Image (spheres, helix red, strand yellow):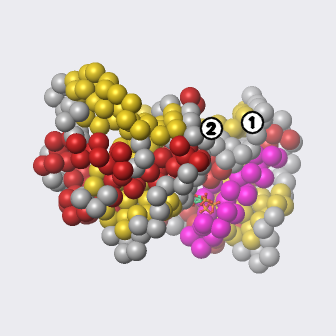
Amino acid sequence: MQPTDITCGSVVLQPWAERDIEALVAGRNDPEVVRWTGSPFPYTREHAERYVREETPQWWSEGSAATWAVHDATTGAVLGAVALHGIKDGEGEIAYYTHPEGRGRGTTTEAVAAVCRWAFGVLELQRIGWAASVGNWASRAVAQKNGFTFEGTSRLAYNQRGTRVDDWLGSLLATDPMVDTRPLPRRVELSDGVVTLRRWRPEDAPDVTRACDDPLMARWLPLPTPYTAQDGVDYVDGFTARLWADGRAAELAVTDAVTGELLGACGLKLGGREQGFGEVGYWTAPWARGRGVAGRAAAVIAHWGLTGLGLSRVELLAEVGNEASQRAAESGGFVREGVLRSARRDRHGTPHDVVVFSRTAADAAAPPT
Ligand SMILES: CC(C)(COP(=O)(O)OP(=O)(O)OC[C@H]1O[C@@H](n2cnc3c(N)ncnc32)[C@H](O)[C@@H]1OP(=O)(O)O)[C@@H](O)C(=O)NCCC(=O)NCCS
């Protein structure tokens, strides 16, 4: 395989050369690169010299790996690295990192796209694999923005400098359209002027803990009791982020549209999205109850589901005994349809009857009030 330059938009990919050695040492010792890759640490000048002078030229010549320094097309500065490892039998695996000052500008996405197009076109690969340690959302975003299909988690599949960690896996086939495969938009902000629904942020964790460590909440929702500070962190950082990324549910923080104060939570379960179906759930923080927050939030999220996500029906289920929730559903414009018997189990496994409400695409013609 001939070492090749690839020029694309704002970056130029060039096989590693002597002039890049210092940048290579700096890049490989960056804390985020150390955290998310298996690169040796500390990464010394000797490592870099061997990589540039011996290893990568050998991989190019035997056709087992193609590796590039990513240069800024204007300044020539090294922004990061991209590589295709394990090239064999029509397959290879993409790998990349970007220096802190180059992140968040779309250049990694651009470089990865260029390498994938080159690999499918020139090497005629059929499949490019992607793997990242679980929790590496930025890497996952780069892969999915380029059309990689997320395939799941491989448990303890990666040996990171002697510690085994769970790996996320994905792939891009030569026949796949290289379009974003993330099931939900990264940024969502919905408002009726009184409440604003937005993605959860790490700084919401203490308010979530304060809101959920509440007897009324524990009575109607399957929450841990007592609800600890760690439960709040897991909710905003882990649980809701995973549901969002998998497209299983869009869980949003409900805030005061004027002051930004956290008022509650509202989510749309999307397990039935392919059938045009979603289900709203909500809670209101003790300090914000009795002001119509849940009904407004439910109306806003249902409108988004029915218009933005193309759903035809949004359901809301409230336990027969939960009158506050039923009033909220009605104030949110949901139509009461009847009672589903034994449709919900509580934390002890006891089934309960629930009242089913819905809003449909026909109702959505009117904007939420
Ligand atoms: C992963 C990495 C290469 C991304 O580089 P980058 O230059 O920021 O990538 P881009 O700018 O092309 O795209 C980043 C995307 O990730 C998204 N992203 C960043 N952090 C995120 C997070 N915590 N959750 C979800 N998405 C996130 C960005 O918003 C952006 O997507 P958008 O355009 O839809 O907003 C960089 O963070 C890095 O070098 N990390 C350390 C090394 C590493 O993890 N390498 C991959 C090992 S598998």
User: What kind of element bears circle 1?
Assistant: loop
Residue located at (22% from left, 40% from top): 322
Q: Provide the residue span drawn in magenta.
A: 96-118
Q: Position of residue 103 (x, y in %)?
A: 60, 67
Element carrying mark 2: strand
Which is nearer the eye, 81 or 175?
175
Say few, some or many: other residues with alpha carbon within 10 Å of mark 2 (under 14 / 14 to 19 / 20 or more): many
Report if residue 179 is visible in the image. Answer: yes
Image side of residue 250 versus residue 215, left or right: right
Residue under the point 61% across and 63% down: 98
Crowdedness near tag 1: few (<14), some (14–19) or many (≥20) residues, C-alpha within 10 Å = some
Q: From the viewer's side, name the closer residue of 276 and 323.
A: 323
Q: Amino acid at mark 2?
A: Thr
Q: Nearer the viewer, residue 363 or 152?
A: 363
Q: Quadrant of the N terminus?
A: top right
Q: Is 113 part of what is drawn in magenta?
A: yes
User: Is residue 251 at least partly visible in the picture?
Assistant: no
Residue 160 in the image: x percent, y percent? Answer: 45, 47
Q: Is residue 338 depicted above or below 334 in this figure?
A: above
Q: Which mark is residue 225?
A: none
Say whether disc 2 or disc 1 marks the residue closer to the N-terminus. 2
Q: Which residue is mark 2?
A: 149
Q: Label 1 belongs to which residue? A: 176
- Whether residues under marks 2 and 1 lie with C-beta atoms below 8 angstroms apart, the answer is yes
Amino acid type of the residue tagged 1 in the rendering:
Asp
The tally of labels here is: 2
Which quadrant would residue 259 be assigned to in this image?
bottom left
State the CA–CA distance, disc 2 to disc 1.
9 Å
Residue at point 62% right, 53% down? Answer: 142
Give the main secondary structure of the magenta stretch.
Answer: helix
